[in-house]
Image: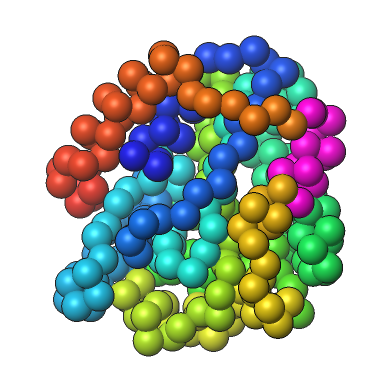
Amino acid sequence: MNMAVDDALLETPTNPADYTLRFYRWLRPRVSIGYGQEWRSGFDARLARRHGMALVRRRTGGRSVLHAGELTYSIAGGTEEGPFAGGIQATYSVIAEGLVAGLGRLGIEAEIVRSRGRRDRAEPGACFASRALNELVTDGRKLVGSAQRRAGGRALQHGSILMDRPDPALWAVLGSTGPDAARASVGVNQLLGTRVSLRRICGFLAAGVADRLDATIDDGVLTQREMRAAAARERSHADPAFIRRR
């Protein structure tokens, strides 16, 4: 249901000045692949069965991500005016600056990749095997990977914030680039040398993003319209034809 809710937030109109920021973790490890990615390019089915992992497909682009020992974020908002109106990379940059501010409140100095890297949604391999423009690194190791989709005057951005030390053996489920991606990445708890509560981490990250968007934070729940839309999207997300499409 997690990413079905995000689909609903992308497709359900709201006040142009409103943004919806969500943080969530997965009950069981999952691998998500980008909307345009060929499923076999970022998923080792044999290893996945051994670890009891399933495959899901995101509506956003990018490459494969292991949802284990990480925190997933999503943010949706209008693109006709405000901070998301400047285009794809400008939106990536705004959100990245907010996440950097939030991580800074935790005591983590993250940097935004400013080189002109490519974001090829159909490129094979693992997300954390590359450093794309406006993603986050610290001491040269990748900490946050993100992907975006824009449609109907709205934008949705997904991101994976690593929490624990990446395990190359487990990351092999992402295919041949997985183990090297794990070794080139780093988690929040690993950097801090201790485990911080998710509530505290989410609070700091939300505050950083809200400041950058010049927005206030209000706890909320999904509307009935959004819940109905999410239920409909959940059926399509579970369809093998969607997950394994070329």
Q: Quadrant of residue 177?
A: bottom left
Q: Is residue 213 magenta?
A: yes
Asked whether 245 or 187 is in front, the reply is 187
- Figure check: 230 above or below 13: below
- Identify which residue is drawn at 76% across, 51% down: 204
Q: Position of residue 112 (x, y in %)?
A: 76, 60
Q: Is most of the magenta stretch helix, strand or loop? A: helix
Span of residues in magenta: 204-216
192 displayed left or right of 168: right
Asked whether 12 or 39 is in front, the reply is 12
- Identify which residue is drawn at 56% across, 46% down: 23
Q: Position of residue 195 (x, y in %)?
A: 64, 73
Evaluate whether residue 205 shows in this view. Answer: no
Q: Quadrant of residue 29?
A: bottom left
- Where's the N terminus, which quadrant? top left
Q: Position of residue 209 (x, y in %)?
A: 75, 42
124 displayed left or right of 163: left
- Figure check: 31 above or below 205: below
Asked whether 215 or 91 is in front, the reply is 215
Evaluate whether residue 6 shows in this view. Answer: yes
Asked whether 131 or 232 is in front, the reply is 232
- Figure check: 224 above or below 110: above
Q: Is residue 166 magenta?
A: no
- Identify which residue is drawn at 64% across, 53% down: 199
